[in-house]
Image (cartoon, rainbow, N blue to C red):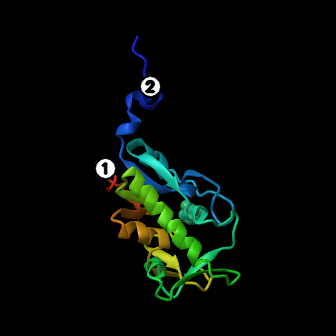
């Protein structure tokens, strides 16, 4: 009798699915600043078509969980990466920009290592936000812009969207791209 390998369960070869970078909290990993996850049903749909690669840039950047809430101040994530005066500041007034930059670099390194061309990231996070971020006043006021990691992944050539985008219109299955040399 022909035996199936574990990665071929259900007749699907998991190795053939294209990789997708995804915010770890969307899978339910308790890594957000409150020490909780943010599980979303759309992840099940994405997992049928993609090999999910979870990353939490804030944890990869060296921040503890739980941690003080932080917001972008003076610009968006691209401005923080450009070191043009924009910062990530937490609610205690501490500048945590360096940790956010480290986390963004780590997420880009993971994306390159697996050859990912798309990312689905948690909306409105100072790291992962893809279209709007809080404005640094800690008053829940949104302004247009990306988080630091979302900006870094976009600059690295990935198509970046949020879980809300994916729920509204799931991204089409991508072809697997080889890791950049
Ligand atoms: Fe981590 Fe991004 Fe989720 Fe924040 S939004 S907990 S940085 S994965």
Q: Is residue 125 visible?
A: no
Residue 147 as seen in the image, left or right of residue 154: right
Circle 1 residues within 10 Å: few <14, some 14–19, many ≥20: few
Q: Is residue 41 visible?
A: yes
Locate the C terminus by quadrant: bottom left
- Quadrant where ligand 1 appears: bottom right
Percent of width and height locating residue 145 = 44, 78
Residue displayed at 60% across by 86% down: 137
Q: What is the residue that sits farthest to the front in this orientation?
A: 181
Count of numbered circles in the view: 2
Residue displayed at 57% across by 78% down: 97
Residue 173 as seen in the image, left or right of residue 24: left
Percent of width and height locating residue 64 = 68, 64
Percent of width and height locating residue 123 = 50, 67
**Residue 82 position (above or below residue 108):** below
According to the picture, the residue beneath numbered tag 2 turns out to be: 5
Mark linked to residue 144: none
Q: Nearer the viewer, residue 21 or 46?
A: 21
Residue 37 as seen in the image, left or right of residue 102: right
Q: Quadrant of residue 162?
A: bottom left
Tag 2 near tag 1, CB within 8 Å: no
Percent of width and height locating residue 150 = 44, 68
Q: Nearer the viewer, residue 154 or 105?
A: 105
The residue carrying mark 1 has its beta carbon less than 8 Å from ligand 1: no
**Residue 103 position (above or below residue 29):** below
According to the picture, the residue beneath numbered tag 1 turns out to be: 178
Q: Quadrant of residue 15?
A: top left
**Mark 2 → mark 1, Cα distance in angstroms:** 24 Å
Nearer to us of marks 2 and 1 is: 1
Residue displayed at 44% across by 45% down: 47
Q: Secondary structure at mark 2?
A: loop
């Amino acid at each position: 009798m022909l035996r199936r390998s574990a990665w071929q369960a259900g007749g699907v070869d998991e190795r053939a699915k294209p990789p997708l970078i995804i915010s770890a909290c969307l899978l339910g990993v308790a890594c957000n600043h409150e020490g909780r996850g943010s599980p979303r049903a759309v992840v099940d749909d994405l997992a049928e078509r993609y090999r999910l690669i979870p990353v939490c840039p804030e944890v990869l950047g060296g921040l503890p969980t739980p941690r003080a809430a932080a917001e972008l101040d003076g610009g968006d994530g691209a401005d923080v990466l450009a070191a043009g005066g924009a910062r990530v500041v937490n609610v205690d007034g501490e500048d945590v920009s360096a940790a956010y930059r480290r986390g963004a670099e780590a997420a880009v390194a993971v994306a390159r290592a697996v050859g990912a061309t798309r990312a689905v990231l948690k909306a409105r996070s100072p790291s992962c936000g893809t279209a709007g971020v809080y404005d640094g006043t800690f008053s829940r006021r949104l302004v247009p812009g990306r988080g630091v990691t979302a900006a870094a992944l976009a600059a690295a050539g990935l198509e970046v969207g949020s879980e809300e985008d994916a729920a509204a219109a799931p991204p089409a299955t991508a072809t697997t791209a080889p890791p950049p040399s």
